[in-house]
Amino acid sequence: MAACKRPAAVLDAGHATTTQGSSAACKRSRHSVRSSDDYEEVTRLGKGGFGVVVQARHRVTGKTVAIKYAAELEQEAIFLEACSGNPYVVGFEGLMRDHATGRHCLAMEYVAAPSLHAFLWERRRDGPLPEPKVRAFMWKLLTGTKMMHDRHVVHRDIKPANILVGQDGDLVKMCDLGLALHMSDSPPYSQVGTVPYMAPEMLLHKPDYDALVDTWSLGCVMAEMLTGKTLFHDDDDDDGHQDQFNDTTHIVQLWSIFRVLGMPDDRMWPEFKSLPLTAKFQQLLPGVLNHNRLRDMFPEEKLSEQGFQVLQGLLTCNPDKRLTAAKALKHPWFTAPRPSVAAAKVEALPLRRKKTPGFLVALAAALKAQQV
């Protein structure tokens, strides 16, 4: 299963992204193709495997936009256009052609704000975000995701690096729809995304997953806001940057998930045993912990019962029982008075449990030795 890293279309991508093929494009966009000569570059915002993103100004109107230069952009333009009017997704400005190279470039709303990944990193000494502020962020993220799903668009790479935040939390916008999927496309679907935020069904190579992969990712983002650390990680020291993403990477990541949530059984997830990678996972890692320790990591003094119900509902291994964005928004946690983003600082929550030094490194090496 060949795969490669694909950073987010922001400077501080945070984690490598895996790709495996691409889904068929949804209905072709009706947008016109303009010229990049109409804009002058102001500054470079980011550069990586995705291409280059620059801040540019329209020569006539003075409007500032972000322009993305990459090899394949038409499908991303289609998804951005499908999300037009969604206040929590970066706006679509148009698809343009660079006359100098003949290649397409994508003009998007310019958001003068850091990513959530950078935001959390900058405030790491202040401790994680308090619950009221997390609730405010999650309401916006779930609302934006619901609007995407209502238009049959699945992001497939929601993570802190692909969420822009500003104005003390009032501004929240998701970006980088380069891996998005339209649900009118027929399965099988590829395993794509950023490994620490990928849903179990995708890691297990379920060919017909759906929009619930996004709400799992939002659960991971919620946990990260509450702790300042990535919840499910294949290796504490590796930080997700690997040269190759394959079955070994997915199996190690599944172990990271199941050691927190417990191994699913027939009652919890009837389809689990029939998924393509399950037999190999169980053969290599029999007897994985069955106890769900999520509440131990998020005790009530750190996360209220209603808040925990949302987190647990998003981080449910069985997608048939996982909260949709629409159902999550109806949860009583969001009926409380709109929280102030200027909430009191809380102490950092210790996320990681002590483990045998280098265990996951040794595990990955053992799996490779068995030609996983």
Image (tube, rainbow, N blue to C red):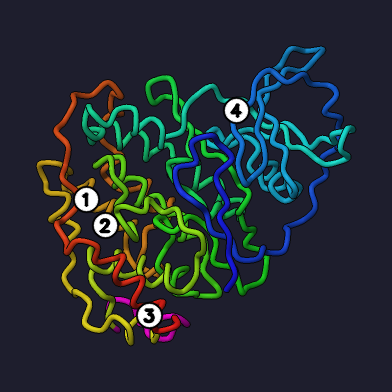
The crowd level at tag 4 (other Cα within 10 Å; few <14, some 14-19, many 20+) is some
Question: Real-space Cα distance between discs 4 and 3?
Answer: 42 Å
Give how far apart the Cα atoms at labels 3 and 2 are: 19 Å
| Res. 181 image quadrant | bottom right
Which residue is labeled 4 in the image? 45
Q: Secondary structure at mark 2?
A: helix
Q: Which residue is mark 3?
A: 272
Instruction: Assess whether residue 269 is covered by the magenta stretch.
Output: yes
In the rendered structure, which amino acid carries the disc numbered 1? Phe
| Residue range corresponding to the magenta coloring | 266-277
Q: CA distance from mark 3 to mark 1?
A: 24 Å
Left/right placement of residue 355 relative to residue 25 reads left
For the residue marked with disc 4, what is the amino acid?
Leu
338 vs 154: above or below: above
**N-terminal-most mark, 3 or 1:** 3
Q: Which residue is depicted at the point 28% across and 51% down?
A: 310
| Picture residue at 67% right of the left edge, 41% below the top | 51
Residue type at tag 2: Gln
| Disc 4 secondary structure class | strand
Disc 2 to disc 4, how far (Cα)? 36 Å
Instruction: Please give the residue where the numbered disc 2 appears in the rendered image.
Output: 312
| Labelled pair 2, 1 in contact (Cβ < 8 Å) | yes
- Which amino acid type is marked by label 3? Phe
For marks 3 and 2 on the same chain, the one whose residue lies earlier in the sequence = 3
Mark 2 or mark 4, earlier in chain: 4
Q: Is 344 drawn above or below residue 371 in the view shown? A: above
Q: CA distance from mark 4 to mark 1?
A: 37 Å
Q: Main secondary structure of the magenta part?
A: loop
Q: Earlier in the sequence, mark 4 or mark 3?
A: 4
Q: Is residue 310 left or right of residue 355?
A: right
Q: Going by the image, does 240 lie left or right of 181?
A: left
Task: Tell me the SS state at disc 1.
Answer: helix
